Amino acid sequence: MNGKPMPTPAMVRRVVIASVLGNAFEWFDFAIYGLFAVVIANLYFPAGNEFASLMLTLATFGVGFAVRPLGGVLLGLYGDRVGRKKALSLTIVLMSVGTGMIGLLPTHAAIGIAAPILMVLARLIQGFSVGGEFSGATTMLVEFAPANRRGFYGSFQMCSQALAFSLGALVAYLLTANLAPHDLEAWGWRLPFLLGILIGPVGWLIRSRVDESPEFLAYAEEVKHGKTQPVKTPLRTVFSDYPGAVLSTLGMSVVGTVSAYVFVFFLPIFAKKQLGLSAADVNLSTFLSTAVLLIFCPLAGHLSDRYGRKAVLLPAIVAYGLAAYPLFHQLVSGPSFGSLLAVQVGVSCFMSFFWGPTPAVLTEVFPVSVRSTGAAVTYNLAVLIFGGLAPFVNTWLVHVTGNNLAPIYYVEFSVLIGIAGVLLLPATARVRSVELKLDRSA
């Protein structure tokens, strides 16, 4: 936007740190529920048999995603109206509340039916918070970035998620490798959740020390002086004025979210329960594979700045789809630490190259006036429909079909949706600068 205030390099660095660390804290708390799903199933959802107990736990994992669109829309609207900074501070406080509840919650043996009910409530609070986190943190990163480096800066959003998954897997590995099963179930699993309570004060402090987004400030000034009319119904505007942007980013979000919730969340559970691999081996493999994402996402974002979003996204999604099947088939045919590591690290290499550019695309296709709302809606709809229930759906598919390859068909279907989404993006070498896309008449 013309005349927007230019942030200092020091402030840009502070925004990157605040967005990455705060977002990583949030996703760490969200991720460890999935990593300790088997333990939580035994303590909070005793259902008479092991499969039913695990399915109830995974359904509760999915419940957190049911409110994500609501959280994304409400917190996105809040961010579009009062600013990105206030919205991000609110999300991190909400996450600490939900996480603290899980860490302190008595088990089913202690308080009966109240235990699973309170667990569901905690997951709802977590889901509401994370629903607004992605769009809020991504919008801040992109709006502070130089116009020709939005892909690179936006990729740090995915780095923060990879960092959270990696740290969560490392903590889970250390606990499972060093604690006796009885100690892990009695108190060890609670430690990362109790640690997560710190995200409230620490995250709020970090984010309170950054400036408001320069693009949002410039937009607010234009509204104040009557140069731009404010958007009174951002949600309706997103769907009515930007249907192409919604469809393309929805498709891209589908392949991204399925890749995360199948290979980072579902696969560790599948490897332990269905293939018989040890918890320590599974957590170590997950830690190493998410470290790959952490390394390569910034490179992918940089390449998308240089060569264009589609030039990086399309071949990455196709290669991921081609590699996923044989690697997963190898794991199912010969379960071992090596075959699990091969599939997780192998797909992570390709995932990095469509994860990295995605945050920039999800935000820059919408104007400042509805950007946070637009990114929140498309991302969280994809996560609700295809991501949060992926562990539940795939565990059920394997159980009812007796076919351990069933999850890979779910993955390949998401690949087709992702390819369609990328093809719907603008055909230009780079997505147009948002300054040109801003509808000043709102």
Image (cartoon, rainbow, N blue to C red):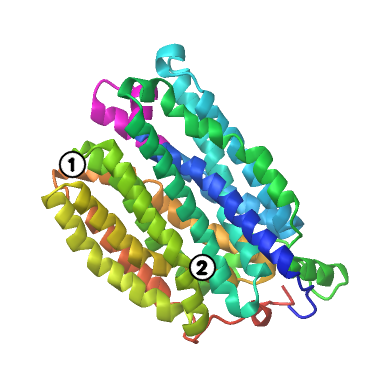
User: 41 above or below 130?
Assistant: above
Magenta segment: does it hold 59?
yes
- Residue 42: x, y in percent? 33, 24
Determine whether, in the image, residue 23 is placed left or right of residue 273: right
Query: Which residue is identified by label 2?
Result: 246
The reply to whether dot 1 and dot 2 touch (C-beta < 8 Å) is: no
Q: Earlier in the sequence, mark 1 or mark 2?
A: 2
Q: Nearer the viewer, residue 370 or 144?
A: 144
Which amino acid, mark 2?
Answer: Val
Q: Give x and y (percent) for residue 41.
A: 35, 28
Decide whether residue 365 is among the magenta residues. no
Tell me if mark 1 has few (under 14), some (14-19) or many (20+) residues whose alpha carbon lies within 10 angstroms of its own.
some
The image quadrant that residue 275 belongs to is top left
Q: Is residue 66 visible?
A: no
Task: Tell me the residue at 59%/40% (across/down).
Answer: 95
Where is mark 1, residue-wise?
A: 275
Give the main secondary structure, helix, strand or loop, of the magenta stretch. Answer: helix
Q: Position of residue 63 (x, y in %)?
A: 45, 39
- The span shown in magenta is 38-60
Which of the image's four quarters has the N terminus?
A: bottom right
